[in-house]
Image (cartoon, rainbow, N blue to C red):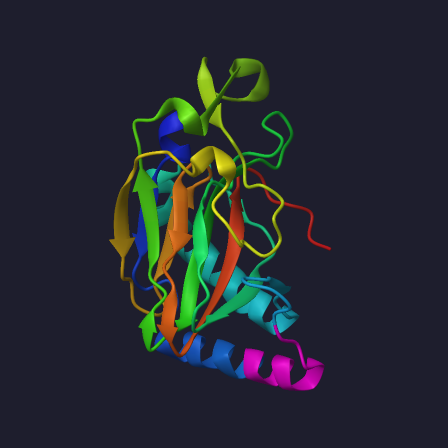
Amino acid sequence: MIRLTETLALQSVEDFLTAAEREHLIKIMDSELAATGWRPRHQAEVLRAPAPAQEILRAATARSLHVLQRALPSVAADARWGYTELTAGQYIPTHIDGIPDPAIAPRRIGRIGVVIEQADEGGEFYIETTASPAVWTGELVGEPEGYAPGTPLTHRLPHVHDHAAVPTWLEDVPSTRWITPAGAGTGLAYGAQVLHGVQPVRAGRLRKFVTDLLDTPAVRR
């Protein structure tokens, strides 16, 4: 049974990737980008990670699952991983990923990201907390959908592909920001209903992988 607390949880895994795995992933992506010529067309565009990277990241998730389940006990697997990068002046504004289809498995319980190369300055991941009711839709789910009775749902990530602006329903919400300057190789997992974002990169390039954390394994295509 999925509980509200895990959709609002935060969990770090400091040794999610070993130094050797991180270096291997950097080489894989350097090769992939050189071969394909891929560059983000807009801020925070996500590229599906190539198969060799998926294999490393899936193994890292499986290895760390017992740690992730302390805070997000309903998590059973990761979805396909994506790669993204931010350069100077780019950022990800505060938003909520949310739970797209609460009654349909696999359900998004949370997200996880891991940096393989930090920016020279800036680019820190953060979460925000607020007492404002504005983040909640008023919709409730319960046991028929697989949740604890009376579990409230937040708004979801709007389909703004370039993460260009704060969603309108968040613009005037008072909140407290908690910055998490985790090092490269650290996995940062956060519940699907957590306000979060990435601070502006001031210099260099931030490179990271991200994926959903699911309550049942997804069909991988």
Q: Is residue 84 left or right of residue 104?
A: left
Place of residue 206 in the rendered image (x, y in percent of width and height, measured from the top left): 43, 71
Q: Quadrant of the C terminus?
A: bottom right
The residues colored magenta run 29-39
Place of residue 36 in the rendered image (x, y in percent of width and height, measured from the top left): 70, 80
Q: Residue at x 62, y 31 (%)?
A: 101
| Extreme residue in the right direction | 221
Q: Is residue 77 left or right of residue 170?
A: right
Identify which residue, 117 or 56, lies in the foreground: 117
Could you say which quadrant of the image residue 23 lies in?
Answer: bottom left
Q: Residue at x 36, y 33 (%)?
A: 173
Determine the main secondary structure of the stretch shown in magenta: helix
Q: Residue at x 57, y 35 (%)?
A: 107
Q: Is residue 37 magenta?
A: yes
Q: Residue at x 52, y 84 (%)?
A: 27
Place of residue 120 in the rendered image (x, y in percent of width and height, measured from the top left): 33, 78
Identify which residue, 86 or 116, lies in the foreground: 86
User: Looking at the image, can residue 118 be seen?
Assistant: no
